[in-house]
Amino acid sequence: MNEIVLFGFPIILNPILLIPFLLTLLTVTLISWIAMSLGLVARVVTEVHWAMPPLISGYLATGGHLSGSVLQILNITTGILIYLPFIRVMDRRAARKESLEDKNTALLKNTLNTVVEKIHSSTGEVNGEITNFSVVLESIVEDLNDLSAQMQRQMQLMRTCDDYMQIIDTSVGNTDTSI
C-alpha cells in the first residue's frame, strides 16, 4: 500500500499526507504486535516474498493459518480509515482550487470578450469617423473643383479683358497720334 501512496500521491513535502503516512505504519504495527502477543493471530513462521499478494502472504507467513489473512484485512481496513479523512481534505482543496481556476478562467474570458467588444466598437467608431471624414473630404474636393473651374473662367475673362484693353490701348494710341 505504501508504494501506491508514495507514487500516486505527492507524499514528499506534503504535510497533509505526512500525518497518515506515519500514523498508519505505527498503528498497523501496533495492531499486529498486540494481536500476536495476545495469541489472536498465529505468529509469523516463515518469510514470504515481498511481491506476494496480500491475504495470501498473511496466510503463508503464519504457516497456513487464516488468522494471518484476517489480520491483513484488519490492517488494510485500518489504513484506509486513517487515510480517508486526509484524502477528503486533499480532494476538497483540489476541488476548491479547480473551482477558483474555473472562476479565474471565466473572469479572464469575460475580460477578453469585453476588450474585444471595445476594440470592435472603437474600430466601428473610427471607421464611422473615417467615413464621415471621407465624405467631408469629398465635399471639399468638389468645392475645390468648382472653385478651380470658376477661377479658370475668371482667368479667361481676365485674358479677354486684357485683350480688349490692348485693343483699346492700341486704338487710343492710334487716336492719340492722329490727333
Image (cartoon, helix red, strand yellow):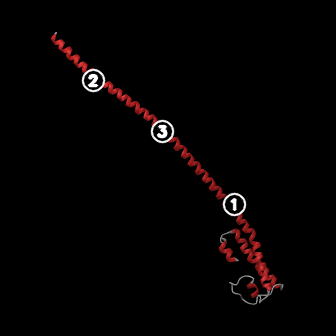
**In the rendered structure, which amino acid carries the disc numbered 1?**
Arg
Foreground disc of the pair 3, 1: 3
Q: Left or right? Give the position of 85 relative to 137.
A: right
For the residues marked 1 and 2, what is the alpha-carbon distance in whole angstroms? 91 Å
Please state the total of marks drawn on the protein image.
Answer: 3
Q: Which residue is mark 2?
A: 159
**In the rendered structure, which amino acid carries the disc numbered 2?**
Arg
**Picture layout, residue 176 above or below residue 16:** above
For the residues marked 2 and 3, what is the alpha-carbon distance in whole angstroms? 41 Å
Q: How many residues crowd mark 3 within 10 Å: few (<14), some (14–19), many (20+)?
A: few
**In the rendered structure, which amino acid carries the disc numbered 3?**
Thr
Q: Quadrant of residue 22?
A: bottom right
The residue that appears at 71% across and 82% down in the rendered structure is 53
Q: Which labelled disc corresponds to residue 96? A: 1
Where does residue 63 sit, x and y in percent of width and height? 77, 90
The residue that appears at 16% across and 12% down in the rendered structure is 177
Q: Give the secondary structure at mark 3.
A: helix
Is residue 107 at least partly visible in the picture? yes
For the residues marked 3 and 1, what is the alpha-carbon distance in whole angstroms? 51 Å
Q: Which labelled disc corresponds to residue 124? A: none
Q: Which labelled disc corresponds to residue 131? A: 3
Give the mark nearer the N terminus: 2 vs 3: 3
Q: How many residues crowd mark 2 within 10 Å: few (<14), some (14–19), many (20+)?
A: few
Q: Give the secondary structure at mark 1.
A: helix
Where does residue 82 sit, x and y in percent of width and height? 76, 72
Quadrant containing the N terminus in the rendered view? bottom right
Quadrant containing the C terminus in the rendered view? top left
Give the mark nearer the N terminus: 3 vs 1: 1
